[in-house]
Image (cartoon, helix red, strand yellow):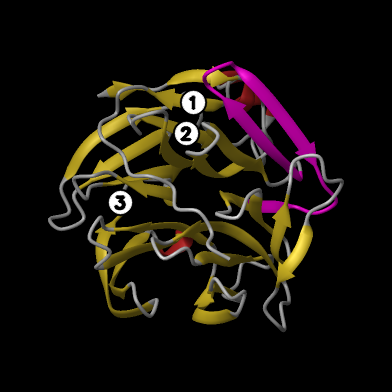
Amino acid sequence: MAQAEILLDVKAALGEGPSWDERNGLLYWVDIDGKSLLTYDPATGEQTKATFGKKLGAAVPRQSGGIVLTLEDGFYAYEPGMDEPVLIGAPEGLSQVRFNDGKCDAAGRFWAGTASLTGGTEGALYCMDTDLSIRLVLDGISCSNGLAWSTDNQIMYYIDSPTRNIMAYDYDLSSGQISNPRVAIEVTEAGAVPDGMTIDEEGMIWVALWGGYGIRRWNPHTGELLLKVDVAAEQSSSCIFGGPEYRDLYITSARSGLTEARLADQPLAGGLFIYRNAGQGTPTYAFGG
């Protein structure tokens, strides 16, 4: 058993979508319900917060500078100091959904999905290529969440949270096509569903369990549970490796939906946590468009 420590007691309503910007040594993450982009500089301890007019889902660095975000209805470009992000791409026909988690692959494509606002399966997974074209990859999704790619870029892992499954797909990095879907991990912990996810250099996946008070490290090839990382927040939501050598695991969490009684038992809910010296992590890929 391992224990994460609180890093920032920010009390985010719905912390999510973290990424590491290697160029600037910054951690980005979002507060979905707080409509905010948050940054943290571990070298100085400096924190910033920018609040917008729409809910955010995820934040990734952009190769040409700045950040690309998912907001409720599409992909947006953002530079620090801007009043509002600028729309750069949106799928047609979005209805009864909002964008949620997202991440870039090694070719610089931004993969992000939507979550149903009705509890149905109106959600989908999209891919925005570096030319800003957007294609539908999967539909019939309830709540699109974690994404990760194997270090050899041969496998993509994906989570639609209510299914409680972590799926694996064969992946063609040159085309961005997925095939051969299969269940890599089935989450069986009572009351917990898989949420955000990352992967380490050994090809093991680290998955935040919403309702599970922490992170689980699994071998996706054998299904073996390798490590439990306890987090003092029931709604652990996502995780990403960061720091100079990608050895620290940053963990987001949420307060949204918890009763006052339950919040009293977990006053650090909504905080940003860290599990130090977690192992050799993988970098966050920047958007190439």
Whether 43 is among the magenta residues is: yes
Of the numbered discs 3 and 1, the one sitting upstream in the chain is 3
Give how far across and how far down residue 200 sits, in percent.
27, 44
Q: CA distance from mark 2 to mark 1?
A: 5 Å
Discs 2, 1 touching: Cβ within 8 Å: yes
**Which label lies toward us, 3 or 1?**
1
Q: Which residues are magenta?
A: 35-57
Residue sitting at x 50%, y 18%? 6
Q: Is residue 289 above or below residue 13?
A: below
Label number found at residue 251: 2
Decide if residue 260 is in sight here: yes
The quadrant in which the C terminus is found is bottom right
Task: Give the SS element for disc 3.
Answer: loop
Based on the displayed image, in which of its 4 quarters is residue 80 positioned? top right
Discs 3, 2 touching: Cβ within 8 Å: no
The residue carrying pointer 3 sits among few (fewer than 14), some (14 to 19) or many (20 or more) residues within 10 Å by Cα, namely few
Residue sitting at x 34%, y 76%? 174
Whether 203 is among the magenta residues is: no
Q: Is residue 255 above or below residue 116?
A: above
**Which residue is outermost to the front?**
64
Residue at numbered disc 1: 273
Q: Nearer the viewer, residue 66 or 234?
A: 66
Residue at numbered disc 3: 188
Decide if residue 270 is in sight here: no
Q: Nearer the viewer, residue 265 or 99?
A: 99
The quadrant in which the N terminus is found is top left
